[in-house]
Every structure is written in structure tokens, then in C-alpha cells.
Image: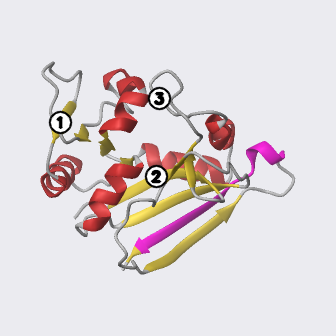
Amino acid sequence: MSIIRLEMTMSVDGYVAGPRDSVETPMGVDGFRLFNWLDRREDPGPSGEVYAEAMATRALISGRRTYEHANHWHGDHHDGVPIFVLTHEVPDEPPPGSVRYVTDARECAAQARAAAGDGDVMVHGAGAAQALLRIGELDELHLHVVPVLLGQGRRLFDNLAADHVELELVRCLTTPSSDKPEHQVMHQLYRVR
């Protein structure tokens, strides 16, 4: 069965976007700092390895907010994989490309797993991740932790219930200490138990 894996870059203090994120400023104030490590995505080493793994996924689940802030990825996130947008309301206009709107998190997970076949499913967005985690449909969290404190913005786990979730650290890769500070990142892969 397909693994549903959150791929999320965040600051050490848990922010996935800076303050005042919007369609015009999708990562908020100073939020794009979180993605400097992607400058090294073509290099051999930890960042290149995890980027290649993410791009090998066969379907994508995204929260509606993330989908809109990313300008719909112009209908194609990577390699034409099906994109399932978890939303409270389906827009009137038809979605572009391989995009499907889904209003139920369990149904969204089932459709994405079916579409991925024997491949894995990538998840983007704090809201989608929390919805899938709440219903037991998020199998792994791949967190790319950047050594910066944003201090404010949108946090990854702000709206979870009080129940605790046990995680198992499966892998931890770090960029070389010789890398420029803006390219440094720790890639942590957790399995949800």
C-alpha cells in the first residue's frame, strides 16, 4: 500500500510560513528563507537525496490554502502526478490539469493512494497534514528543519487536538557544516506509530 508522507520545510520554532502569508506573498514576510536549502537540490548529498525522493512520489495531496498560495502549480506539481486538493468547498470553476477537489479527508487519502499505485503520496500544507493526522491517514512526516527562528507566522501543528501522537525517528540527515548557513538544513523522517 502507498505511504502518505508529509513533506514540509519549517523553522526550528515550528513555522512553515512567515507572518501575513497570502496569495500575493505566499510564504509571508521572510518565509522564503525556509527554502534556501532547495538551491542545493541538484547536488549530491542530503538535500539532493531527499528532493529526489519527494519528486519520485506518484500523487500529491494539498490543502486548499497551500494550493492557492502556490498558484495551483499551474496544474502540474511534478511529472503530471494527480493532485488532490483537500477543501471545505469545491469551487465552481473546473480544476486545471490533473487536479481533483475532495471535501472528505478519508476519501482524499483513498483516492490518492489508489492513484499512486505502488508509489508514495506527498502531502503539502499544514491544514491537510493535520486533517490526515487526525484520522490516522498520515504515515510519515518528512520535516526539513532550517536553522532559523521566524518568531511568527503559520505553524505546522497549531490546530491539533490535545491527544499526543507517537513518532518514530527513522532517519536524520544533515547538510555538511561547511555549507553556507542559508543552505543548512536537517532532514528528519518520522513514522507515525
Q: Nearer the viewer, residue 80 or 35?
A: 35
Amino acid on which disc 1 is placed: Tyr
Sequence order check, earlier mark of 3 and 2: 2
10 Å crowding of disc 3: few (<14), some (14-19), many (20+) = some
Sequence order check, earlier mark of 1 and 2: 2
Looking at the image, residue 42 sits to the left or right of residue 94; the answer is: right
Position above or below: 49 against 33: below
Amino acid on which disc 2 is placed: Glu
Q: Nearer the viewer, residue 152 or 149?
A: 152
10 Å crowding of disc 2: few (<14), some (14-19), many (20+) = many
* Residue at (15% x, 44% y) in the render: 103
Q: Residue furthest right?
A: 178
* Residue at (77% x, 43% y) in the render: 182
Amino acid on which disc 3 is placed: Ser
Q: Residue 101 carries which label?
A: 1
Sequence order check, earlier mark of 3 and 1: 3
Q: Which region shows up in magenta?
A: 180-191
Looking at the image, residue 96 sits to the left or right of residue 160; the answer is: left
Quarter of the image containing the N terminus?
A: bottom left
Mark 2: secondary structure:
strand
In the figure, residue 60 lies in which quadrant?
A: top left
Which residue has dot 2 on it? 7
Mark 3: secondary structure:
loop
Mark 1: secondary structure:
strand
10 Å crowding of disc 1: few (<14), some (14-19), many (20+) = many
- Please provide percent x and percent y for residue 39: 68, 36
Quarter of the image containing the C terminus?
A: bottom left
Q: Which mark is residue 22?
A: 3
Cα distance between the residues tagged 3 and 2? 20 Å
Task: Check residue 21 for magenta coloring.
Answer: no
